[in-house]
């Protein structure tokens, strides 16, 4: 049942009661009991014996079976035993803190959890910059002391589109380094069992072979247009490995390709390409003017719908036990050009005006084609929302929520 839930399309409506309803009680703050930390399967040498924070595993036992008895499952991986328990067994409830909870991916996770992906005993806590300034170590530690999470999905970041990155590389570096270090160290200090952080395919080398995969992150410098953000995100992978090596922490990361969906930042100057295009088409249609797409339209991207990514995040939190990151992406065959993306938006919004390309604007990195081969070894049957359908839903959400949308 849970496997089907993670892979299928959930019915939803944009606006109205579904958007304004009170979040269910399982998302509220509730006391949480203690619980052993799971052992990472990749470190079976530590599995034989008593860990200072976890269960006793003896030589001759099946470490992976013990891991999944303690850790539980939502969608059984190939090696998980039949009848694995959920995350809340046997030590009480699980509290999941989601930083950046009011952003694009955070809101998507919140919706998927509220629509049935949450399990009994799970307490989901979504926080934003209004709750704490995560660039400040004291505020970050105070937040973690207040919430006392057992698990963390770390989404908070200073983010922006191509042109904002070009202008503020230093700011992107400094703010994200502070945020990430504060979050990971606070998680370590309060005994969080697992952290899943969010990276980006822009962290990969600019000069590389394609498709890129998880082994190639540190093989060369990233594209110079957003090197500040890219290096700051790369350092999460370095920190995750260091926390595991020195303290045995299960800190890992996912690498999504270009994410879009409801609650995105639709600012034309500072947002990413697809939400910027949606806003541009809306304005052009309203004013009866031409649509101008920045750049040549030739660069290619793999777009992932935020609600698909949310389901995959939940799977990673419950099932993925490697410290090494995992790419979350549609297949290489689903890569589209910026021109094709613009055409999908034009079609979804029924825009009938002229479309032009301003070739004086930078194209940014031409392509960053990523392999989802590792993901497919775990979830071969996961169904992504077709690109045009996801664009249509996002356009409908933006039109319906135009006054409240970030822009």
Image (tube, rainbow, N blue to C red):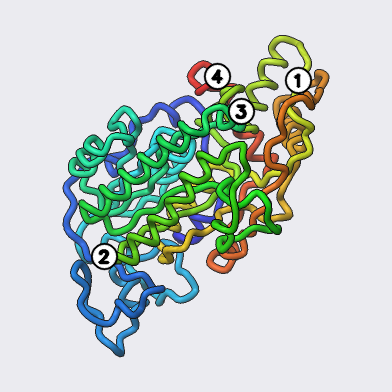
- Residue that carries the numbered disc 4 in the rendered image: 402
**Of the numbered discs in the image, which one, if any, rests on residue 163?**
3
In the rendered image of this protein, does residue 120 appear above or below residue 403? below
**Mark 3, mark 2: which one is toward the viewer?**
3
Question: Which residue bears the numbered disc 2?
Answer: 37
Q: Earlier in the sequence, mark 3 or mark 1?
A: 3
Q: Secondary structure at mark 2?
A: loop
Which numbered disc flags the more N-terminal residue, 1 or 2? 2
User: Where's residue 286, x and y in %?
Assistant: 69, 12
Measured in 3D between alpha carbons, the distance from the residue under mark 3 to the one under mark 1, in whole angstroms, is 19 Å
Circle 1/circle 2 CB separation < 8 Å? no
Q: Is residue 241 above or below residue 60?
A: above
Earlier sequence position, callout 4 versus callout 3: 3
Find numbered disc 4 in the image and state the secondary structure of the residue it sits on: loop
* Dot in front, 3 or 1: 3
Whichever of callouts 3 and 2 sits on the residue coming sooner in the sequence is 2
According to the image, label 1 marks what residue? Answer: 291
- Can you tell which quarter of the image residue 237 is in? bottom left
Q: Is residue 181 visible?
A: yes
Mark 2 surroundings within 10 Å by alpha-carbon count, few (fewer than 14), some (14 through 19), many (20 or more): many
Judging depth in this view, the residue of 20 and 407 nearest the camera is: 407
Point out the image quarter for the C terminus.
top right
Mark 4 → mark 3, Cα distance in angstroms: 23 Å
Q: Position of residue 134 (x, y in %)?
A: 32, 36
């Amino acid at each position: 049942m849970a496997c089907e839930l993670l892979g299928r399309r959930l019915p939803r409506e944009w606006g109205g009661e579904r958007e304004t309803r009170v979040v269910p009680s399982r998302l509220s703050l509730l006391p949480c009991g203690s619980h052993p930390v799971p052992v990472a399967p990749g470190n079976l040498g530590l599995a034989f014996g008593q860990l200072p924070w976890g269960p006793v595993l003896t030589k001759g036992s099946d470490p992976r079976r013990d891991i999944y008895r303690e850790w539980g499952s939502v969608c059984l991986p190939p090696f998980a035993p039949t009848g694995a328990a959920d995350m809340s067994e046997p030590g009480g409830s699980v509290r999941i803190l989601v930083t950046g909870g009011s952003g694009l991916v955070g809101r998507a996770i919140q919706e998927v959890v509220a629509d049935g992906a949450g399990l009994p005993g799970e307490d989901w806590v979504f926080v934003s910059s209004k709750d704490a300034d995560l660039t400040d170590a004291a505020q970050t530690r105070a937040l973690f002391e207040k919430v006392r999470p057992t698990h963390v999905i770390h989404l908070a970041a200073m983010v922006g589109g191509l042109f904002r990155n070009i202008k503020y590389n230093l700011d992107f570096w400094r703010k994200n380094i502070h945020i990430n270090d504060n979050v990971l160290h606070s998680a370590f200090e309060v005994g969080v069992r697992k952290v899943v952080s969010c990276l980006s395919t822009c962290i990969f080398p600019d000069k590389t072979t394609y498709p890129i995969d998880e082994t190639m992150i540190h093989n060369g410098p990233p594209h110079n247009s957003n090197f500040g953000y890219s290096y700051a995100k790369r350092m999460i992978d370095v920190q995750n490995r260091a926390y595991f090596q020195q303290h045995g922490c299960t800190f890992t990361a996912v690498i999504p390709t270009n994410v879009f969906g409801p609650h995105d930042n639709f600012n034309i100057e500072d947002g990413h390409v697809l939400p910027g295009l949606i806003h541009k088409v809306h304005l052009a249609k309203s004013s009866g003017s031409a649509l101008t797409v920045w750049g040549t339209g030739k660069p290619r991207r793999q777009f992932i719908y935020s609600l698909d990514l949310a389901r995959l995040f939940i799977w990673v939190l419950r099932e993925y036990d490697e410290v090494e990151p995992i790419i979350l992406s549609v297949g290489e065959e689903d890569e589209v050009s910026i021109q094709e993306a613009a055409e999908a938006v034009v079609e979804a919004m029924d825009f009938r005006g002229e479309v032009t390309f301003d070739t004086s604007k930078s194209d940014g990195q031409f392509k960053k084609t990523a392999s989802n081969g590792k993901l497919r070894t775990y979830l071969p049957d996961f169904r992504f929302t077709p690109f045009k359908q996801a664009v249509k839903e996002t356009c409908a959400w933006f039109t319906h929520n135009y006054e409240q949308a970030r822009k």
